[in-house]
Image (cartoon, grey):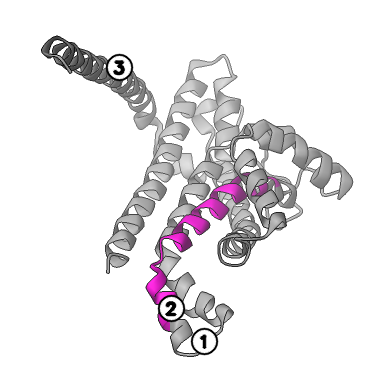
Amino acid sequence: MSKSNQRKSRIVDKTFKYIGLAFTVFALLVLAVLITDILIKGLTRINWSFFTNLPSRHAANSGILTALAGMLSLLFFTILIAIPIGILAGVYLQEYGTNNKFAKFIEINIANLAGVPSVIYGILGLTIFVRLFGLGNSLLAGAFTLALLILPIIIVATREAIRAVPGTLREASYGMGATKWQTTRRVVIPSALGGILTGIILSISRAVGETAPLLVIGALVYVPFIPEGPNDQFTTLPIQIFNWVSRPQAAFITNAAAGIIILLLITFILNGIAIYIRSKWYKNIKY
């Protein structure tokens, strides 16, 4: 390569570097402005009564008790449904379905499902769980819908975690006379547990902020009671925020900002736990 071409390549590299840096700084500035505006509006509204009060048509008396309880209950049932199915499917696809056409068909569809908009899952949940199974707009219908939404994330994370386990561990287990299932259950899955947990936590953090599929299946905007069973109606914190934002009064916008702060804190905590587990896991698999 001539000196002139080398000089042009260096100029192009530097130009791309600075353009990328400028766009990154711009995006961070916009994010900082938005977060600052939310903090200024919402921090003054966060107090103990905000967590313990029921929703109200008076902004000063309105709280997130039912929304927070509904969100936690929904996540509990979603985890019960999605985690066993997701982990078992990931183990099967990685350990048992490598040369199986049916497994490859499932793998292709899982990859496609990971990119489907969340509102499509809401339509699917409305058709199958609400109408066909007759669950109505209950916690179970919402949990099954969100479980479908996060299953691809858990399955892909499980597969990647299992794939990262060194093959020498499997060979050592087989050399000791263990069967494939014994090796998978006692060696592979425990070694991949950190990566699996990371995928589970990240999937939960996504489910926390979902609103569109729950609105489609008929989750209520206003619920004056805490759900006590899987067949009860429910609302969630994102839906409550949506309700407040749609109100014309400025006081409800303040409530929405406070709710967004709580939702961001929950999401940051979950992502922080996932990053910590992932870093610890990567250190442990470096033999």
Image coords of residue 11 (percent x, y): 17, 12
Mark 2: few/some/many CA within 10 Å (<14, 14-19, 20+): few
Is 203 left, or right, of 129 in this rendering? left
Residue at the left extreme of this rendering: 3
Q: Is residue 226 visible?
A: no
Image coords of residue 118 (percent x, y): 63, 34
Q: Residue at x 63, y 31 (%)?
A: 117
Query: Which amino acid does the dot numbered 2 rest on?
Result: Glu
Q: Residue at x 31, y 59 (%)?
A: 282
Q: What is the C-alpha distance between the residues marked 1 and 3?
A: 54 Å
Instruction: Between residue 205 and residue 251, name the one nearer to us.
Output: 205
Image coords of residue 147 (percent x, y): 65, 50
Give the label, 2 or 3, closer to the camera.
2
Query: Which amino acid does the dot numbered 3 rest on?
Result: Phe
* Location of mark 1 (residue): 178
**Mark number displayed over residue 23:** 3
Instruction: Between residue 236 and residue 43, name the one nearer to us.
Output: 236
Q: Earlier in the sequence, mark 2 or mark 3?
A: 3
Query: Which amino acid does the dot numbered 1 rest on?
Result: Ala
Give the label, 1 or 3, closer to the camera.
1
Q: Residue at x 66, y 59 (%)?
A: 81
Residue 213 lies in the magenta-colored region? no
